[in-house]
Structures are given as C-alpha cells and as structure tokens.
Image (cartoon, rainbow, N blue to C red):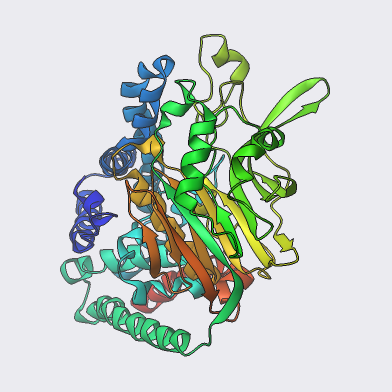
Amino acid sequence: MVTSLSLPPFNYLIINFFSFSLFFIFLIKKFDHHKNKKFYFIYGWFFGFGYFVTNLYWISISLTFDQNFRALIPITLIIIPSFLAIFYGLVSYLFILLKPKKIISSFLLFSLIFGSLEFVRGSLLTGFPWNLIAFSFSNQLEILSITSVIGTYGFNLFCISLFTSPAIFILRDSKRDIGVCVFFLISMIILYVHGSNYEKKFKNIKKNSFDFKVRIIGSNIKLDRFYSDIDPTLIIQDLIKISDPIFDENIIFIWPEGILPGISRDELIEYDWLFNEKFTENHLLIIGINNQSENGGSKEYYNSLSIYDNKLNIINTYDKINLVPFGEFLPFENILRSIGLKSLTNNHQSFSSGNKRNIIEINRKKFSLKILPLICYEIIYSGKLFHNSDFDLIVNISEDGWFGQSIGPRQHFVHSIFRAIESGKYVVRSSNNGLAAIVNPLGYVEKSVKLGQSGYVDLESIKKIQPTLFSKYGNKIFGLLILLYIFLIFSFNRIKNE
C-alpha cells in the first residue's frame, strides 16, 4: 500500500527502495524456512493487491454516474485489484520455482520475471499497463529520457532492479556482490548525465514555426450532460467562448473527447448557425464526437476524432481502436444487458472498434499538418501506437470526468509525458475535466490548463528531432533486454559455481 505513494501525483520514489528490497528479502528468507511453493503465490498476490487497491480506487468513481452500476462499486474495488494482483502472485511463485542458489542470479531473475509479467499485464486481453513502477520517475525527466532508447517497459525492468538492489547488501554471498548494487546506483548518475546532454542538444535545435496556431482547449463541463438532457447548444456556445476564435488568425482548434451529448459526427452540421459568426475559412476544428453507421441492417457506434472545416464539412476522421471495457464496450454484452447493464459512455450499445490507426494529414490552403490521433486511454500503450514516425504531433483528446476529484486524471496525464519522450514528438492533449497541455519531446510541459479550469494553450512552433531509437524498433528493444538479463543470470551462476 505504501508503494503507491511513489506514483503520481505524490512521487515519493524513495519508498520503492524499501518496499521492493524488503519484499525480495522476505521471499528469500521465507524460502529458507519452508519449501511449499504455493504460499509464494499468495505472498505476491497480497503485495499486488495492496498496491493496486490503493492506486486504482478511482475506477469505481466512474460507476457513480449510473444507478445501474452503483451496486457494483464494492465489487469493483475488490475485483480489479484482485485480478491485477494475480500477475504479482505469479512473479513470486515463478521466482521461487526457478530460484538459483546464488544471490546475484536470484536478484536478476526476480527483476526479469517481474518486468516480463508487467509487459504481459499491459498486453493480455485488452491490456492495462497502468501504474508501472517506472512512473515513479515522472518528475525526473533527465533520467526518464532513456525511454527514448529502451521504452517504458525497458525502463520499468531497470527500475525493478534498481529498487531491489539494496537487498544485495543484506543477502550478499560475498563482498564482490555489492558491486552489482553499486552499478545500479551509479547508473542513475549516468542516466542523469545522458538526459542533461539530451536536453542541451534539444535546446540548440531551431524551432519550426507554423503559419497557424494549434489551440488546445481545456474545459470543465460536468458529466451531467450525458444524463440530464442538457441542450448541446449551450455546450457548443461555451466551447466557442473558451476557444476565443479570432477572425483573421489561422487556428486549428482541438476540443475534448465526446464533448457533445447526443450529437453524432454527421449531425454536427445542423448546428452550423452557432459557428457562422465566429468561425471563418481561417479556422479548422478537431473534436471528439461519436459516429454511427449501418452494417447489415444494424447500427454500429464509434468513439471518433473528426476534423471539420469552418462550414462543418468533414475533412477526415478516426474511429477509436482500443476501447475501455465496461466504459465503452460491455464484455458478454448479450448476457449482461439482460440484467440491466450497459456501457457507461454510450446510451445505446457498446462502441465498435475502429479498423486501423492511420496518420491524418491535413492539407488545406492555410494548413499543413500531420497528426497521430489518440483518443483517451489509447495513449497508455507503449510501443503499439504507430509504425511510421512521419508525423508532426500526437493529438490526444480525453474525458477525465469519470475519475472525479481523484488522483486518476493526474495518473492519466503522466502517460502523455512517457509517449512524448518515447516517440520524440510533441503531444498536445485536450481534456474535459482533466489536464490540457503541450508536452515537448523531452517530457516537459510547456503550457497547460490546470485541472478544474477552462481555457486554452497555443502551439505555434515545434522542434523536430531525429526519430528516437524506440520509435524505430519499439518493444523489440525490451526483448533484447530480456535476453541480456537471461545471459547475465547464467553467467553469474556459472562464475559463482566455478
């Protein structure tokens, strides 16, 4: 439970040196007293349950908006942490099952199993790579710059080793073992120096100015709009007012995810009269808006990002691929709908998943821009977002009101920092009831609209850097690190035996 305090927004990462080391020491010492390996799954499960129950409690807040789901709140508080804790149970069980006799090999094996199963957790079924221990470093951007090379999972593997390394002082087979612990501590300095040099190079890069502004909107419109039949006209008027369009300035406006209740992508043009006075040919609009289509006589619904001109003609669109279970689609829908359940964010039925995420190229008379569209929690996936790095910006739109006044919106925002560093691209994030911001390729937040406020920030220029190593090879680099750990485990074991 205490380990959760190392995560955003607290970031007391010093805690991890104690909790991870003590957990590792506990497993080793307990192994000396009894050999029943089944108990070790339980030990790991309790470690994981304590961790997740304290940092994912906010998921249950999303169930408070619909009476049909409120009865599930106590179950959700227990079931989700219980399921995720299974991975931590497997960590300790597999570790004891395969444990070498020598402490350094055991230390490396523990890190390897832990890091590998965290990758599995982020990939299995729909995947939920939330609150990897690597996020403890979200405030140490110099050190975090290494994710541009090894990615988040690679860095997470390093973090597990780093936080567990003090245990070697207590469990060492000889004084020489301390060298491994010292290596991981010194590596912190090396990573900091690397990050500082990376930052200096970035600062010397010349800015490329746009002939237009990208205006990212942060709004604070309540979720009641989905349940209280609020007139979407009022919301559009509020958003136009926040956007502050200027007649003769070229501006691309970015509005949050699903911000307009009850209006589909093709129906927005019916509200053109609201835009006519304020929007001119100098303006484009990127907005999160639902889409529906006919397929075999039945309707399908999509959570979409769409681009409109000032006349509300559709220029391009993207349908979300990675949907949120229960939030956007209902697993076993036919069964669960029969007992009154439905997806939270769609009053009709589950959203359908889009086919493919392509780079959207905006080529207009006054605008030239390539964007990678990501809707809401699609930004949490490391190494799976794109294959072609030929784009200018990552555009992330989100609705964070489902998290309430919890730590959820801050945890969600941190993923933007990691994706910016990994990809070497600017991330612009428009959010309702969350953080709207511009994050540069170093992970620094250049401008932001604070949580709970409405406003906008403008992006007028960017610095382009060479594609990062991670953007080229993705999680293949994590695979190489796994092979390196396996090699080291066998090498240390052989050296000790000799």
| Residue at 32% across, 28% down | 78
Residue beneath the point at 58% across and 43% down: 288
Q: Is residue 27 left or right of residue 119?
A: left
Taking depth in this image into account, of 435 and 83 the one nearest to the observer is 435
Image spot of residue 198 (x, y percent): 43, 84
- The location of residue 367, given as percent across then percent down, is 69, 66
Looking at the rendering, in which quadrant would you find the C terminus? bottom left
> Vertical placement of 237 versus 31: above or below?
above
Residue occupying the point 60% across, 59% down: 252
Q: Residue at x 42, y 67 (%)?
A: 155
Q: How many marks?
A: 0
Image position of 370 (left or right of 148): right
Q: Nearer the viewer, residue 401 or 231?
A: 231
Quarter of the picture containing the N terminus is top left
Residue 294, quarter of picture: top right
Q: In the rendered view, does 468 fall on the left or right side of 409?
A: right
- Work out which residue is located at the far top of the displayed protein and give it: 339
The image quarter containing residue 274 is top right
x, y (%) of residue 464? 57, 79
Is residue 232 visible in the rendered structure shown here?
A: yes
Answer yes or no: is residue 153 visible.
no
Decide which of 218, 3 is in the foreground and name it.
218
Is 475 rendered above or below residue 65? below
Question: Percent from the top left, x then y, of residue 361?
Answer: 72, 62
The one of 298 and 370 positioned closer to us in this rendering: 370
